[in-house]
Image (cartoon, rainbow, N blue to C red):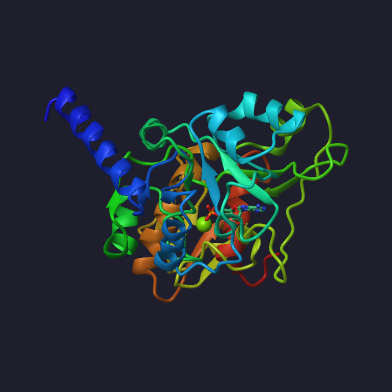
Amino acid sequence: MSHTEKSENLNEAISLAANVILSGGIGGIPTETVYGLAADALNPEAVRKIFAAKGRPFIDPLICHVCDMSMARSIAFFTRDAELLAQKFWPGPLTLILKRKPCVPDIVTAGLETVAVRMPSHKVTAELIRKCGRPLAAPSANPFGYVSPTCAEHVREQLGDKIDFVLDGGECSRGVESTIVSLSEDSRSAGKILRFGPIAPEELVAALGRALDCNPKVNEARPTAPGMLKTHYSPRSPLFLFDSPEQVEGLKSNIIFMRRPENPLSNHYWLSENGDLETAARSLFSLLRRLDKVSPGGFYCQRAPERGIGLAINDRLFRAGKPMQGSV
Ligand code: AMP
Ligand code: MG
């Protein structure tokens, strides 16, 4: 297929998807973080279908995806700090929690007075939102609690029969869900990171020129972000976490390392050649899914260094598995 034919097909697919969304349907959309399951954010009946397809509890609010600032301002009140962060990191993998405007249905925000807003950078989805002319509510396109999807095939495999379309935009370039920052409180208060993601805490602090609360906490009773539940992003097979390669020496189970081991064995896998954390994040969910299928007795994954996107990798691993015995 020629390049032009391919892009014509893609344009056609985006137009069809926009029609489905505008008539109340739902479908898989590519973003730079993970694939989303999208509906018209202003149509409560359509949004309800997302919860049904995912088996997601209604207490778990959704992120609204926008394509420009005027759409963003139509659903949320932007503080000065919010303007600053949007200007610096949008379009990109940052979600802002802001005071909502009345047009946002309760089902989207789980009845909260705040709404989560993000402007994704993926060209296909940006174009889809532009064609729809309204924000798209979209959580990750996976059954609730399972590992997030990072390619169209992951979405088809698990939700294909429950949704109206999947737009294929290739593999996600970031591979972990967006960083979530709450700025909804009084602007004099510090603001808070609710979920680690591709934008590192120090980047946010530098952009704001002030401190942020950078300790997302596990809160089972009333999670502000369900990504904050202790068990989330979980494979079905047991996953054990370790720090140094000596801890897994001689084990016959499948083992994921952060970087390629010097003398890899047939049960060894790695998230990057040289330990690059951006690459590791991009490969993480795909490899967890792959090994989940072939490791019924369980498998192992090494934790990342606690810096940059490594914080997001470890956060997902913490919720997906448990420390192997003898490690902390
Ligand atoms: P997902 O798209 O599956 O990664 O989930 C969206 C995340 O955004 C969840 O962890 C939600 O709890 C979080 N979220 C959405 N809206 C809000 C809000 N108003 N306040 C706090 N967290 C939110
Ligand atoms: Mg999710």
Q: Decide: is 326 above or below 263.
A: below
Pinpoint residue 318: horizontal percent, then vertical percent: 62, 61
Residue 40 at least partly seen: yes
For this view, does 107 lie left or right of residue 85? Answer: left
Q: Nearer the viewer, residue 23 or 86?
A: 23
Whole-percent x, y for residue 327 in the image: 67, 65
Q: Residue at x 58, y 34 (%)?
A: 72
Figure check: 156 above or below 179: below
Q: Write the residue at 43% across / 65% down.
A: 54
- Residue 310: x, y in percent? 61, 44
Q: Residue at x 36, y 59 (%)?
A: 290
Q: Residue placed at 38% from the left, 38% from the top?
A: 132
Dividing the picture into quarters, in which one does residue 243 lie?
A: bottom right
Q: Hey, which residue is sitting farthest front in the picture?
A: 102
Asked whether the viewer can see residue 244, the reply is no
Quarter of the view holding residue 94: top right
Against 65, residue 161 (above or below) is below
* Position above or below: 133 against 48: above
Q: Quadrant of the N terminus?
A: top left
> Which one is nearer the viewer's eye here, 83 or 248?
83
Residue farthest to the bottom, as pictured: 297
Tally of numbered tags: 0
Q: Nearer the viewer, residue 142 or 162?
A: 162
Q: Residue furthest right?
A: 188
State the image quarter where residue 141 is shown. Answer: bottom left
Quadrant (top left, top right, bottom left, bottom right) of the C terminus: bottom right
